[in-house]
Image (tube, rainbow, N blue to C red):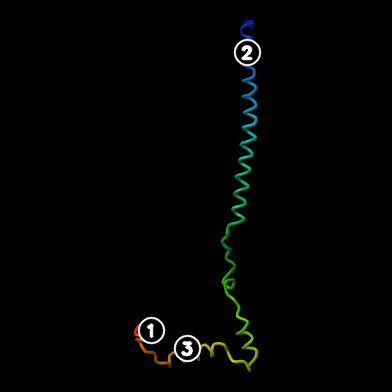
Amino acid sequence: MAIQPIDLQAIFSQMDKVGKTQAFLKDGQQIQEALHQAKAQQKLEENVKSVNESQNMGEDSGKIKDENRRGAAQDGNREQPDSKAEDKIQEKKDTIRDPALGRNIDISG
């Protein structure tokens, strides 16, 4: 079966559409790849900015060392901070407070 001139005329008139379609397909793959890379970059930035859960490093990792207590234990002349706190608590218990204190407002002025 031979190609007739009318067939060539139809083919040539459709050649620009075929070229555009091929270009769109080629560009579509590049655009799709660029979008994928942009999403991956955005996810990476979110991971960097987010707060990560710390790994369990053992029981002693969460404890804070109190250097004042250690210094007080080494130097026998210093008073221990715990005894000062206990004295303040004892003073608060010894004071007598009026239960109506702070509840009445004097408007006679």
Q: Earlier in the sequence, mark 2 or mark 1?
A: 2
Q: CA distance from mark 2 to mark 1?
A: 99 Å
Whether residue 33 sits left or right of residue 107 in the image: it is right
Return the mark for residue 89.
3
- The residue positioned 50% from the left and 91% from the top of the image is 87
Discs 2, 3 touching: Cβ within 8 Å: no
Q: Position of residue 65 (x, y in %)?
A: 61, 78
Q: Quadrant of residue 75?
A: bottom right
Discs 2, 1 touching: Cβ within 8 Å: no
Residue type for callout 1: Gly
Whether residue 31 sits left or right of residue 98 in the image: it is right
Q: CA distance from mark 2 to mark 3?
A: 100 Å
Element marked by disc 2: helix
Return the mark for residue 102.
1
Residue type for callout 3: Ile
Report which residue position mark 2 lands on: 11
Q: In the rendered view of the protein, which quadrant contains the N terminus?
A: top right
Query: Which mark is nearer the camera, 2 or 1?
Result: 1
Q: Earlier in the sequence, mark 1 or mark 3?
A: 3
